[in-house]
């Protein structure tokens, strides 16, 4: 009977943690570039059950393996690419393929799939509440002219005419490059550590994203890869498991009280 307390209590704790993970996914369903988390459970302290005779305890017969505790093993991040949403915002970007944007933060360089950028008070391209976006040369990108264009390679250019040319001049405008948005990838995503604001950190050195640079999609963002229907289904399943364990645990407590108050008198 005491083993049931371990099974039920550990099950309730595990389901509570799973609900926290699911809730976090649901909250970030509209967060650009967010990658869903999945919690994986495992058993703890597996033991072999044996059958022995009433008097002769020799030569026990193994029956099966049982575990007293269920626990959270780890949380996996699903890096599958989300769908793209066209926003027509000049500071919105999405990566078509694998790779991450590089962000300069007070804690060091961080990486993200969230391309919903803006410009700060000094005119630098930035990820709000995170840091400035880095270019291929490792420097922040300063946007001093909003009349820019971005190609699939991430090159940000501004067309500007010569100051001494008239309005009717047939001279082609000069192209001035503001920078190239840096996109990197990693050999082992298992070494990526998920942080707040959709950022990732890692001790491994970044490399160029594959041999061919992934396509950068301008005026679009990558949507979260969270499926609300799947998350709702998982939440209801976890809630019912938690409620069932609580009900059975209450029954165990009542039985133990009976054994102490009633049976103990005999």
Image (tube, grey):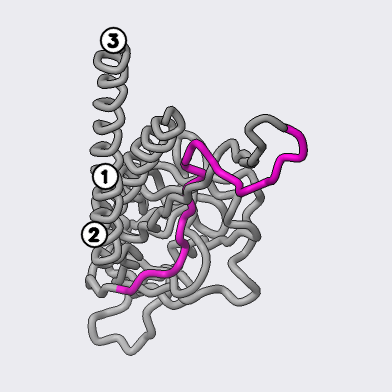
Q: CA distance from mark 3 to mark 2?
A: 50 Å
Q: Residues within 10 Å of mark 1 (few under 14, many from 20)?
A: some
Task: Identify the mark at residue 232; answer none if there is no mark.
Answer: 2
Q: Which of the two labelled residues, at mark 3 and mark 2, occupies the earlier sequence position?
A: 2
Name the quadrant of the N terminus.
Answer: top left
Q: Report x, y in % for residue 134.
A: 48, 53
Residue at screen point 23% across, 72% down: 88
Q: Residues within 10 Å of mark 2 (few under 14, many from 20)?
A: some
Q: Are marks 1 and 2 in contact (CB under 8 Å)?
A: no
Task: Identify the mark at residue 185; answer none if there is no mark.
Answer: none
Q: Which of the two labelled residues, at mark 1 and mark 3, occupies the earlier sequence position?
A: 1
Q: Report x, y in % for residue 203.
A: 63, 43
In the rendered structure, does residue 70 fall within the stretch colored magenta?
A: yes
| Up/down of 99 relative to 55, above or below | below
Q: Which of the two labelled residues, at mark 1 and mark 2, occupies the earlier sequence position?
A: 2
Foreground tag (3 vs 2): 3
Residue named by callout 3:
265
Q: Please, what secondary structure does the residue beneath circle 2 have?
A: helix
Residue 169 lies in quadrant:
bottom left
Give the magenta-colored segment's residue range: 57-84
Foreground tag (1 vs 3): 3
Residue at screen point 38% across, 57% down: 36
Name the quadrant of the C terminus.
Answer: top left
């Amino acid at each position: 009977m005491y083993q049931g307390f371990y099974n039920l209590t550990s099950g309730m704790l595990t389901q509570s943690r799973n609900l926290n993970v699911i809730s976090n996914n649901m909250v970030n369903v509209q967060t650009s570039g967010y990658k869903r988390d999945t919690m994986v459970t495992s058993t703890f302290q597996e033991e072999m059950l044996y059958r022995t005779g009433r008097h002769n305890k020799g030569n026990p017969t193994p029956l099966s393996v049982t575990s007293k505790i269920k626990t959270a093993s780890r949380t996996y991040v699903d890096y599958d690419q989300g769908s793209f949403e066209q926003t027509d915002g000049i500071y919105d970007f999405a990566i078509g393929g694998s790779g991450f944007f590089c962000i300069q933060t007070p804690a060091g360089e961080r990486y993200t799939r969230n391309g919903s950028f803006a410009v700060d008070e000094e005119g630098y391209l930035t990820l709000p509440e995170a840091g400035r976006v880095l270019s291929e040369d490792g420097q922040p990108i300063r946007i001093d002219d909003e009349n820019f264009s971005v190609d699939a390679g991430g090159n940000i250019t501004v067309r500007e005419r010569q100051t001494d040319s008239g309005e009717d001049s047939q001279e082609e405008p000069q192209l001035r490059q503001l920078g190239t948005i840096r996109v990197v990838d990693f050999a082992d995503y298992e070494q990526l550590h998920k942080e707040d604001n959709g950022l990732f950190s890692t001790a491994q050195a970044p490399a160029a994203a594959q041999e061919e640079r992934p396509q950068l999609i301008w005026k679009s963002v990558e949507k979260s890869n969270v499926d609300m229907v799947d998350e709702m289904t998982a939440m209801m399943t976890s809630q019912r498991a938690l409620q069932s364990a609580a009900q059975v645990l209450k029954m165990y407590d009542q039985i133990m009280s009976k054994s102490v108050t009633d049976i103990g008198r005999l």
